[in-house]
Image: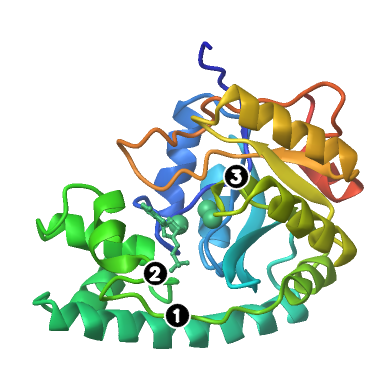
Amino acid sequence: MSAIFSKIDLHTHSTASDGQYTPTQLVQRAIDRGLTHIALTDHDSVLGVEEARKAAEGKIALIPGAELSTSWKNQQIHIVGLFIDIKSDALTKYLEGQREKRVERAMEIGAKLEKQGFKDPYQTCVNEASPGASITRGNYARYIVKMGRAQSTNEAFDYYLKKGKSCYVATHWPDIQVAVDAIKASGGIPVMAHPRRYDLTNTKLRELLEYFKSCGGEAMEVSSPQMSPSDYDYLCSLCEKYGFMASFGSDFHNEGSYRELGLNLRMKDELTPVWRTKNAEPYHFEN
Ligand code: AMP
Ligand code: MN
Ligand code: MN
Ligand code: MN
């Protein structure tokens, strides 16, 4: 199947979490690639949004977002909030809680990496990200590659960071309900992120979507770069079945990966795109 480029990308990362580029550089990349709309959705952080908004002004529509970490049945599930008010009290409170958790966890992972012979992993990752950024395993994976201890970030996960490996730290994130409530209280739309990337059978995935719906979830991502046609068809059918709005995004983090801004993002005509909601009105979607 040929590559399909969309001018809209609703899932991206900057140095406010585990992305390679600053919010300004990310927005410039989107402009250079001819996009008209980009959502910045850093992990548990909205710290990059103001900078991105300034860089976007008059050139591209910047949708404020965040990707919230939650736990469901021992799985880490990501809920993207789109069209959020980044100054909302409810969201700020949620993100402050997440930040405390993340700092503690990142320091624990750093200490474990030190035991494996790495030097100053935590401080090195903090220095490379924006001030106050969420330090995720994604930051550590790139650090491990840079130190020459893995060939790719995927390998860094396989060797050190994933469940069962020496530097894994189990974390209990808030319930999906808490994330959905925080997003809605900030005027945003809760979107189930990359439903195919979890380690779930189809039955479990449907259970997850049913639970998300019962919590007030409103949309789900139906496509991302490199998704197989059968996964895409399946996600579109689930989106319709549960009456969600449809979103999509590359989940772009860094150069040189198949996740590129606007790449291979598709949407079926029978679905209602998330930008049809009134929350999206200020952003002038025309497609
Ligand atoms: P955390 O929220 O700290 O658990 O980190 C999750 C982040 O790590 C994800 O958003 C990805 O950016 C990255 N990640 C997860 N699994 C992998 C993998 N297998 N290879 C490369 N990056 C990964
Ligand atoms: Mn990430
Ligand atoms: Mn994610
Ligand atoms: Mn993401």
Q: Residue at x 23, y 86 (%)?
A: 111
Tell whether label 1 touches label 3 (CB within 8 Å): no
Disc 2 secondary structure class: loop
**Count of numbered circles on the image:** 3
Q: At 11% from the left edge and 61% from the top edge, which residue is drawn?
A: 147
Between the C-alphas of marks 1 and 2, the distance is: 8 Å
- Closer to the N terminus: mark 2 or mark 3? 2
Q: Residue at x 58, y 67 (%)?
A: 75
Q: CA distance from mark 2 to mark 3?
A: 19 Å
Is the residue 76 above or below the residue 166 in the image? above
Q: Amino acid at mark 3?
A: Arg
Residue holding disc 2 = 163
Mark pair 3, 1: CA separation: 22 Å
Which of these two is toward me, 255 or 168?
A: 168
Q: Is mark 2 within 8 Å of ligand 1?
A: no
Q: Is residue 35 left or right of residue 244?
A: left
Q: Are marks 1 and 2 in contact (CB under 8 Å)?
A: yes
User: What residue appears at the point 53 percent right and 68 percent down from the top-left corner?
Assistant: 47
Q: Quadrant of the C terminus?
A: top right
Mark nearer the N terminus (1 vs 2): 2
Label placed on residue 196: 3
Amino acid bearing label 2: Lys
Asked if the beta carbon under badge 1 is closer than 8 A to the nearest atom of ligand 1, the reply is no
Estimate the x, y position of residue 253 in percent, counting from the top left.
Answer: 41, 48
For label 1, the crowd category at 10 Å Cα-Cα, with few meaning under 14, some 14 to 19 and many 20 or more, is few
Taking depth in this image into account, of 118 and 40 the one nearest to the observer is 118
Q: Indicate the position of residue 160 as horizontal and vertical percent values.
A: 25, 67
Query: With 238 as the anchor, is 24 left or right in this view?
Result: left
Q: Which residue is mark 1?
A: 170
